[in-house]
Image (tube, rainbow, N blue to C red):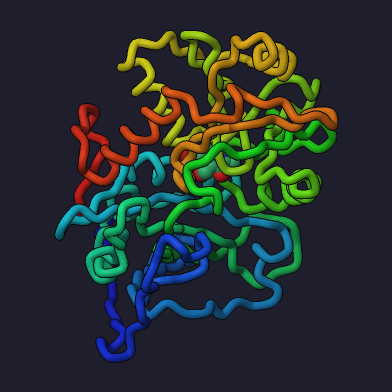
């Protein structure tokens, strides 16, 4: 796909100040000077532009506002000296297209999507922070914009990318988090939209999140919708459990997001020599394993937090502490290796890192 990108830059002396300490910034609250956008007119993508970051103008009747046709992605850019590095960006754009297919939205040309992201990153490259533990979070988004009250796919779409310099996702940083197991609400059911990164999935999870915060938990661990028995995933992360030398994670059965970090973790664990299984894991197996000592470690994995050790599971009004609430050996090794690979400091044996050039 050959689309020219129009470029309209913020004058140098009007650019925003960068945060003085990015590690202290609340995740996703500061945005760079520019954004990329293009529209789909019902026939093809057009009007590709890099322009100053700013508010959108949408009809109050825009379909996305009423019927939820909205999808997005989350990825990160890291600084290594003068270079800016992306981590497996093709997987994000492929997943965006899978989400688009599920939500009856137009697909992107993956090469053009990557090209336009790189062009934006070149322009805002000084927004990629260099402090260890920081990165530039990237949010590609697509919404149905046709002004029409009526449940059907939009005839017009907006696609855009915004950039946000970030430090740790959790205020705890890389410290064990308390997770609330929801046996009342569910996130997704097979055949639903759980495998798509659709905005409405997250809105549907907010109510359980309020139950979680009442007992001091920062995220919800979802169980399957039919039996409320099988582990699915955590709010914005896939879940991995280490039972002795087995590393297990729920299979991609259609109701969980196929995480890029999940895939990378499974590859690294195989490299380390663990027995890696994508299999159903029941909450009873986990709770029992926590008490018998078979569950040695448990962690969430996702782009925002990378690896988040789970220190305790709140289930049926009881806390269940895992391995004395300490970060496990494998959890630490994966965090160090992933950060090292993503930031270009460690060897990248699977060619995951893509420089912006
Ligand atoms: C619901 C959900 N599951 C899992 C993940 C982890 O996916 P990834 O590793 O691609 O960030 C995310 C984050 O994108 C998510 O929102």
Judging depth in this view, the residue of 123 and 212 nearest the camera is 212
Point 58% across, 36% down: residue? 195
Question: To which quarter of the image does residue 314 belong?
Answer: top right
Would you place residue 273 above or below residue 14 in this image? Answer: above
Quick one: which residue is furthest to the front in this view?
324
User: In what quadrant of the picture does the N terminus appear?
Assistant: bottom left
**Whole-percent x and y of residue 62?**
65, 70
Q: How many marks?
A: 0
Q: Determine whether, in the image, residue 31 is placed left or right of residue 238.
A: left
> Residue 4, can we see it?
no
Q: Determine whether, in the image, residue 208 is placed left or right of residue 298.
A: right
**Whole-percent x and y of residue 237?**
55, 38
Point 54% across, 22% down: residue? 297
Point 66% across, 31% down: residue? 312
> Residue 134, can we see it?
yes
Would you place residue 288 above or below residue 225 in this image? Answer: above
**Whole-percent x and y of residue 355?**
20, 49
Point 84% across, 32% down: residue? 317
**Whole-percent x and y of residue 73?**
48, 50
Judging depth in this view, the residue of 12 and 119 nearest the camera is 12
């Amino acid at each position: 796909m050959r689309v020219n990108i129009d470029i309209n830059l913020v004058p140098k002396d009007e650019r925003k100040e960068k945060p003085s300490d990015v590690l202290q910034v609340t995740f996703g609250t500061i945005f760079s000077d520019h954004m990329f956008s293009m529209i789909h007119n019902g026939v093809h993508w057009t009007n590709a532009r890099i322009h100053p970051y700013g508010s959108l103008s949408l009809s109050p009747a825009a379909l996305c506002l009423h019927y939820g046709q909205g999808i997005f992605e989350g990825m990160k850019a890291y600084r290594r000296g003068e270079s800016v590095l992306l981590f497996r960006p093709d997987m994000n754009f492929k997943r965006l297209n899978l989400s688009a297919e599920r939500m009856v939205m137009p697909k992107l040309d993956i090469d053009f999507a990557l090209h336009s992201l790189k062009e934006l990153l070149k322009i805002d490259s000084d927004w990629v922070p260099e402090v260890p533990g920081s990165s530039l979070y990237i949010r590609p988004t697509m919404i149905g914009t046709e002004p029409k009250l009526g449940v059907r796919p939009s005839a017009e779409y907006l696609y855009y990318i915004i950039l946000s310099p970030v430090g740790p996702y959790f205020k705890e940083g890389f410290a064990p988090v308390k997770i609330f197991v929801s046996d009342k609400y569910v996130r997704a059911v097979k055949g639903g939209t759980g495998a798509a990164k659709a905005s409405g999935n997250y809105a549907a999870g907010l109510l359980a999140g309020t139950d979680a915060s009442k007992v001091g938990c920062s995220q919800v661990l979802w169980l399957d919708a039919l039996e409320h028995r099988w582990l699915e995933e955590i709010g914005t992360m896939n879940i991995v459990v280490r039972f002795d030398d087995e590393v297990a994670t729920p299979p991609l059965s259609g109701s969980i997001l196929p995480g890029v970090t999940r895939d990378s973790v499974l590859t690294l664990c195989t490299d380390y020599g663990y027995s890696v299984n994508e299999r159903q894991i029941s909450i009873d197996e986990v709770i029992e394993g926590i008490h018998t000592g078979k569950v040695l470690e448990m962690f969430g994995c996702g782009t925002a937090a990378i690896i988040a050790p789970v220190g305790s599971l709140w289930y049926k009004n009881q806390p269940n502490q895992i391995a004395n609430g300490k970060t496990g050996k494998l959890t630490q090794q994966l965090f160090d290796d992933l950060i090292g690979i993503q930031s270009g400091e460690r060897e990248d044996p699977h060619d995951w890192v893509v420089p912006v050039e």
